[in-house]
Amino acid sequence: MSASELDQTVRLLVNQVGHWEQPRWAATATTGNVPRADLVHRLVQEIANLAADAEGQPRRVVPRLDNDLALPDQLRVVTADLLAARPADEVLARAAAEVTATRGAL
């Protein structure tokens, strides 16, 4: 897995959800019986954890903002952090698998 492949995978998800309004974020995901926004926030947190690990930094909680419309931007930011850390290919593959699984669950 390359950095550009992960970036493309994230762009696909952002393109899928970037135009959603609040009711669509609040709708239940197809798996997990949770709102779609919760599922995407969980993904944001997982990518942030991978970035922190790759940087050798402590993991931090990504704040859950009041406006779910910010989730695509949060995903872009934590993905950029992960890519800047230049992690091993296995980490990039894990991140891409998480993104792909989330896309499928939405």
Image (cartoon, rainbow, N blue to C red):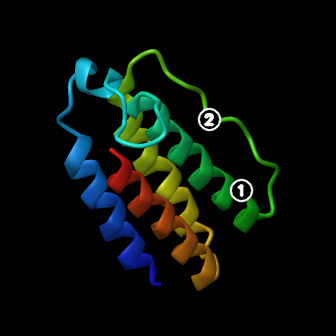
Name the element at disc 1. helix
Residue 27 picture location, percent across and down: 31, 25
Of labels 1 and 2, earlier in sequence is: 1
Name the element at disc 2. loop
Please name the residue that numbered disc 2 is placed on. Answer: 62
Q: Is residue 43 above or below residue 52?
A: above
Q: Is residue 72 above or below residue 103?
A: above
Q: Seen in the image, is 83 located left or right of residue 30?
A: right
Residue 42 picture location, percent across and down: 55, 41
Residue at image position (57%, 55%) is 47
Please name the residue that numbered disc 1 is placed on. Answer: 52
Other residues around mark 1 within 10 Å, as few (<14) / some (14–19) / many (≥20): some
Residue at image position (20%, 51%) is 15
Other residues around mark 2 within 10 Å, as few (<14) / some (14–19) / many (≥20): some
**Looking at numbered disc 1 in the image, what kind of residue is underneath it?**
Ala
Q: State the separation of the CA atoms marked 1 and 2.
A: 11 Å
Residue 85: name its quadrant: bottom right
Residue 9 picture location, percent across and down: 34, 66
Q: Seen in the image, is 12 located left or right of residue 104?
A: left
Q: Which mark is residue 104?
A: none
